[in-house]
Image: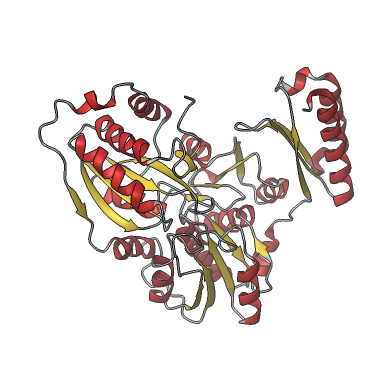
Amino acid sequence: MGKLFGTDGIRGKVNQYPMTPEMALKTGRAVAMTFGGQGKIVIGKDTRISGDMLEHALLAGICSAGGNALLTGILPTPGIAFLSKAEGADAGIVISASHNPYYDNGIKVFKGDGFKLPDEKEAEIESLLLDKNPADQCASVRETGTVQTLKDAVGRYGDFLKNTLPPDFSLKGMKIVLDCSNGATFAVAPKVFRELGADIQALAVSPDGKNINDNCGSQHTENLKTHVVSGGADMGLAFDGDGDRLIAVDEKGNTVSGDKILAICAKHMKKEGCLQNNTVVSTVMSNIGLRIALREMDIRHRITDVGDRYVMQEMLVSGAVLGGEDSGHMIFLQHHSTGDGILSALQLIAALRSASLPLSELAEIMEVFPQLLMNVPVERKPEIENIPRVSEIIRNAEKSLGEKGRVLVRYSGTQPLCRVMVEGPSEEETRRYCEEIAEAVREEIGS
């Protein structure tokens, strides 16, 4: 058996290892034992049809180890992180596969303070999961745990979100289209925006267990764009299945990606004096345009590997309070311990209101450089610098692009692929360099 925890918990196709009810039971037991056996664990889920099955299995495992479970029902991932801290729980568990199709699911674990698990805690849970005699783990437990339902989880989380704004903040006069991806935000997002006074149209708010992320949400904004433009809305806001990502659409129907939202919010926060340490953190996949925009605003920029956990680690080290990914996973650390799509949307609107400009004009803060990504199947994964021909072509491309572009060549962590990404000042140059590098990789180590 390989490592179970990926960059965002355990994930896979339902009823196939490791996403089976048997493994969910073991996971519930292992989490309860790791956090003391008789503590409290908050559990929530998105709208996938398999959520009930996995939830009940997790509950059986937790209770078998003497743990007590608190159920939130359907709630975004950041809502479960918030309630874990608010309830003084020992841990929180989210049943979700984020932006994946309905037939996938996953299990993510938070510490009681709402932060994701450090590697050593994941390793401790994993060792219990891979124990060949799991039943012996609870042989001495004589008092099994209980299950309770948390009252008004949606309302409490909604109040938390609204309290991240100034007391007199209002969205009256704003027309906003929401795309809730038929996922975990379908109830709470429309409620929050209506209570703040916005005139909203809510799309993808009829989950049936199988339509989560299905041509809707942050990865499929075509329908949202149509409704924004035809309805004369001020903006559109799209969340993913578990509600921790945001992609926006301006009043003209243009996509406003995570990088642009980071740049807009960084400028606003610097102006307000709350951009701690004058630093923003993003990953290597952020467009070079973000780096240039931050430099022009005299804001420090820290870059990490792909994954929000690495963004968070660097934020804690550098003292930054703003970080994220171009995919729309953004962290406002002064407000929350994890990425939160609805919170990000509210902070974006706060910046828009402060600037008194439409979103299309705010988004001009950053020029998106043409970017091309090619995936090359490979037989082996030697260090790129140890492949002379490939490394020479990369060096030549980088020299030609200079400050107006960049090259990123790395292997996939889960597939036999080499990812070649090039950004440049024009589509033509970007494609030429990307194809040259990809062809060299293919000839040297391609499968």
Q: Nearer the viewer, residue 148 or 303?
A: 148
Is residue 5 visible in the rendered structure shown here?
yes
Which quarter of the image is occupied by the C terminus?
top right
Quarter of the view holding residue 420 = top right
Q: What residue is at 80 percent from the left and 20 percent from the top? A: 387
Q: Give residue 354's position: percent from left, percent from top.
A: 54, 68
The residue depicted at 81 percent of the width and 24 percent of the height is 391
* Residue furthest out toward the top: 386
Q: Which percent across, then down, holds residue 99? A: 53, 52
Task: Answer left or right for 137 relative to 168.
Answer: left
> How many marks do you count on the picture?
0
Q: Nearer the viewer, residue 363 or 276?
A: 363
Q: Quadrant of residue 304?
A: top right
* Direction from residue 330 to residue 191 in the image, left or right: left
Task: Indicate how the structure is coloured in the image.
Answer: secondary structure
Above-or-below relation of 423 to 180: above
Q: Is residue 109 above or below residue 250?
A: above
* Image position, residue 137 (x, y; %): 23, 25
Residue 335 seen by the camera: no
Asked if 126 appears above or below 307 in the picture, the reply is above
Left or right? Give the position of 58 relative to 269.
left
Rendering coords of residue 119 (x, y %): 43, 28
- Relative to 134, say whether 99 is above or below: below
Relative to the observer, which residue lies in front, 186 or 79? Answer: 186
Choose top left, top right, bottom left or bottom right for residue 411.
top right
Most extreme residue toward the left is 142
**Could you tell me which residue is drawn at 64 percent across and 47 percent down?**
298
